[in-house]
Image: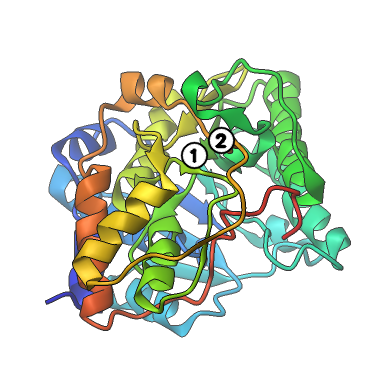
């Protein structure tokens, strides 16, 4: 039986690889934007990795903290929190200096009609952080949406491909990358740009979205017929371990699972678990947002949980009545409107 506690504990159990690398990371870790979907369990994971490695290290979480579940998880596990709206004047100046910064702040959904706020969060704020923490190692979350849609047979976009963001959200993500690139080249800041393509946490993610539609007998869009995803525990491990791979000029790495998976096939597997027949809508276009994770696998190894196991435990979560974060991925969106 899945419970919230069991899920959080699984997400926060460090692998031997993370424990080994945590012992090598020098200095404390400051997580900016730690109150989002991935941040709370990343902080919890980092704290547990420090304990397992036998190292004394502050894990400091910074966010506006609007999610009471996130605040409880952090407080219950002794993680220092600093409530802060980083867009407020002089807010960044009030934050402590830190050898290592993990930048997770960002805005995606709600962009349409409030584009100015998305650009402020995804472009203006990163420029301020690049200046404020120019003497730190910076591991900055980005998105696979900066690449164009590609055919499944290509194996996904690689880090050296020409970029082609569609819509203002994706454009602002590229602006974030360029802001940190400016800091890396101008100040010599060691930087790691982490281009994530769909993390899975059972409470949200592309697998949750597909499973939820199958369970409720709602039509699933197949306009983008394929996808990549990665277990959030593995994704968070890479974010922390990435602090050892910050470079100047900046290091850019695609982070996702090794498989290119079919939306239809995932839906059919969920259908078998739920005893339901999936319903589809739309027309397959042939191309999707897909990333090649070869570089990440070379640096960090394969994820600990593969796609078939993720589908299995996602189905178990739904059958256990597991909570939803109410944050759909909109994986079917092809025009860049979020």
Q: Disc 2, disc 1: CB below 8 Å?
A: yes
Mark 2 vs 1, N-terminal side: 1
Q: Is residue 148 left or right of residue 111?
A: left
- Is residue 86 at least partly visible in the picture? yes
Answer with the quarter of the image where residue 72 lies: bottom left
Residue identifier under label 1: 99
- Is 318 on the left or on the right of 17, as rendered? right
Picture coordinates of residue 40, whole percent (x, y): 40, 65
| Up/down of 161 relative to 242, above or below | above
Residue pictured at 70% horizontal, 44% vertical: 132
Crowd class of label 2 (few under 14; some 14 to 19; many from 20; radius 10 Å): many
Element type at mark 2: loop
Secondary structure state at the residue bearing disc 1: loop
Position of the N terminus by quadrant: bottom left
Q: Where is residue 111 in the image (x, y as percent from the top left)?
A: 77, 62
- In this figure, which residue is indicated by the disc labeled 2? 136
Say if residue 98 shows up in the picture.
no
Compared with residue 43, is residue 71 higher up or lower down, i.e. above or below? below
Work out whether 102 lies above or below 107: above
Residue closer to the observer: 325 or 22: 325
The C terminus - image quarter: bottom right
Asked which colour scheme the image uses, the reply is rainbow
Residue 77 image position (x, y, % from top left): 27, 71
Q: Residue at x 56, y 54 (%)?
A: 331
For residue 189, side relative to residue 11 (left or right): right
Q: Residue at x 51, y 41 (%)?
A: 196
Q: Residue at x 58, y 35 (%)?
A: 286
């Amino acid at each position: 039986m899945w419970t919230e506690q069991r899920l959080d504990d699984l997400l926060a159990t460090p692998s031997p690889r993370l424990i080994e690398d945590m012992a090598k990371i020098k200095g404390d870790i400051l997580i900016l934007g730690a109150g989002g979907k991935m941040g709370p369990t990343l902080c919890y994971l980092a704290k547990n990795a420090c304990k397992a490695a036998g190292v004394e290290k502050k894990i400091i979480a910074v966010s506006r903290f609007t999610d009471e579940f996130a605040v409880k998880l952090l407080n219950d596990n002794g993680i220092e929190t600093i409530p802060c709206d980083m867009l407020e004047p002089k807010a960044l100046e009030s934050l402590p200096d830190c050898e290592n910064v993990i930048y997770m702040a960002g805005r995606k959904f709600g962009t349409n009609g409030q584009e100015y706020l998305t650009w402020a969060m995804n472009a203006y704020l990163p420029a301020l952080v690049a200046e404020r923490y120019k003497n730190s190692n910076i591991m900055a979350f980005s998105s696979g949406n900066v690449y164009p849609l590609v055919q499944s047979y290509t194996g996904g976009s690689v880090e050296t491909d020409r970029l082609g963001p569609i819509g203002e959200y994706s454009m602002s993500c590229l602006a974030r990358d360029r802001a940190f690139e400016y800091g890396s080249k101008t100040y010599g800041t060691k930087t790691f740009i982490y281009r994530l393509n769909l993390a899975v946490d059972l409470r949200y993610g592309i697998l949750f979205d597909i499973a939820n539609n199958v369970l409720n007998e709602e039509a699933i869009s197949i306009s983008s017929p394929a996808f990549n995803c990665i277990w959030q525990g593995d994704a968070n491990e890479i974010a922390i371990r990435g602090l050892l791979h910050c470079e100047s000029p900046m290091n850019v790495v695609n982070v996702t699972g090794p498989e290119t998976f079919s939306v239809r096939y995932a839906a059919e597997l969920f259908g078998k678990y739920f005893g339901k027949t999936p319903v589809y809508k739309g027309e397959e276009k042939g191309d999707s947002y897909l990333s090649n994770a070869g570089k990440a696998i070379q640096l960090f190894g394969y994820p600990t949980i593969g796609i078939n196991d993720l589908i299995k435990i996602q189905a178990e979560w739904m059958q256990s009545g597991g909570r939803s974060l109410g944050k759909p991925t909109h994986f079917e969106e092809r025009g860049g409107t979020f």
